[in-house]
Amino acid sequence: MKADATFDLGLYLTVLRRRLFLILIPVVVLTAIVGAGSFLLPNIYLVQARVVVRNEQDPIKGLAVDSQITQQLGGVIQNLQRPAAQKEIFDRLERVRPRGQNMDAALRDYRDHLQIEEKHTDRDLIVDILYTGTPEKYCVELVNAFADRFQQEGTKLVASSLTVSLDFIEEQLGDYRKRLGALDDAQRKLEEKLNRDLGDLAPQSSSAGLEKYVADQLVASEAEADKLDLEIQAGDAKAGFLQRQLDATPPTLSLQSGDNAGRAEAELERMLGDARAKRMALKTQYTDQHPQVEALNEQIKELEKRLEEVRGGSLGSRNETPNPDYENLQKELFAVNAELQYSRTRRDQLRARNTKLRGVARRLPAADQEMRRIHQERDALQTTYENLLQRRQSLQLNQSFEQGGNTGRFEVGRAGGVPLRPIRPNRRKIAILGFLGGLFIGISFALLAEYLDHSVRSEADLQRYVPAPVLAVLPRAPD
């Protein structure tokens, strides 16, 4: 077949059909060789072991659900990627590792084909250990060895972390106890100072609204002091009036010669009647214990005694007798002065108390603010302290289960539970590539053979060589 300026697909198909034998030979041979050769290649496996670190533990076992231990296991993963840990695992795999593999080659292989991936979920940590290599048993044992090593070191880390956490919490608890004690001392000192300042108001020192209560007491005390001032002024006026009456009243009564006992008796009866009438008037306002009532009672007794003496004739020749009015005025003046003294003392006490209350009222806002600060800080510290106590209890319980080895914190999904399929070589793909390669070679051979063949087999071939018209064509004789 010679080159032609036009492309004729039918001609090419005819050529390929005529040279089919040249095409089939390389296709069959190359497909068979490549396919058979793929079975000589070793199987490469991708093996995976998974370790799930449970953060939320079984509530039935009483384990803490708020442990953050999974955040500390990154150091264990990094340790598994160090040569020291990998050398120990290499020694453990002596019976299953490939022949002729030394430690340096194994470490390079681990670096190139071993992957340790971690993934955090809402509550757990998932660690996937993947290895790509051969043979199958070695790959399975390798990833399982790394998973076991991770579990062992993780368990030790958990126990160590729990111990450190317990020690740290114990230190915190001690510090919080000291701070709570200091706040209690500060509150006690503040209350003692308030008690000293408030005096009889001390029982109100821990009640709410102390500042308003002190202000109300100050207002009431000032009003009472003002009332006492008025009473003292009235008492002074009354005492002056009684003093003037006393000065104008003779202390004794003189009996002139010739006076008889009847005159003295009449005078005493008149005075006794006046005293009794005055007592009745006072008893409508006061009780029997009132000083003025008691003074009148004493005066009446004295008048009755003297009246008995006069009636009994014991007066004799005496020309003078004590004046009951004078004595009554003396007693009344004494009672008024006593009340004045009491009122002045009470007023001075109230004024001193008011002065002290005003000083306390000025200091109360700061004291009340300090007391509120102490209460708020103590409440906050107490809440944190109780949370630490609960945390310590959870850690202690968690530690007991960790030491017992029955926590279920580490769930190891070991490799080798199901038959493994190699990821390489892909024999089907290799066979297809061999077939395609043989087909390409066969077509190339067929086209080359046709190009090198100068035989004339048809009218079209003849016209390519001879430009003259074809006069006749002899058909192929039947076989």
Image (cartoon, rainbow, N blue to C red):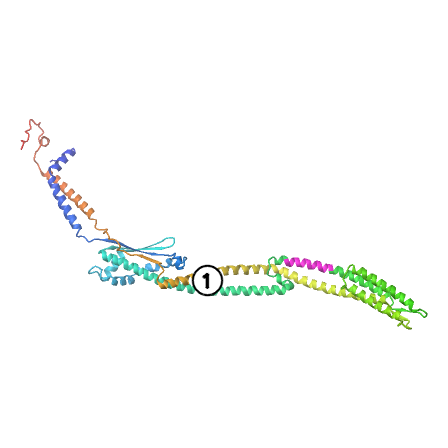
Classify residue 183 as left or right of residue 109.
right
Q: Please, is residue 2 above or below residue 130 in the view?
A: above
Which region shows up in magenta?
Answer: 213-227
The residue closer to the viewer here, 100 or 341, is 341
The residue closer to the viewer here, 74 or 457, is 74
Q: Which residue is most to the right?
A: 258
Q: Quadrant of the C terminus?
A: top left
Q: Is residue 217 magenta?
A: yes
Q: Which residue is most to the front?
A: 312
Q: Residue at x 66, y 57 (%)?
A: 216
- In x, y percent, where is residue 327? 83, 67
Q: Quadrant of the N terminus?
A: top left
Q: Residue at x 77, y 64 (%)?
A: 291
Q: Please, is residue 84 above or below residue 6 in the view?
A: below
Residue linked to disc 1? 389
> What type is the residue that disc 1 sits on?
Leu
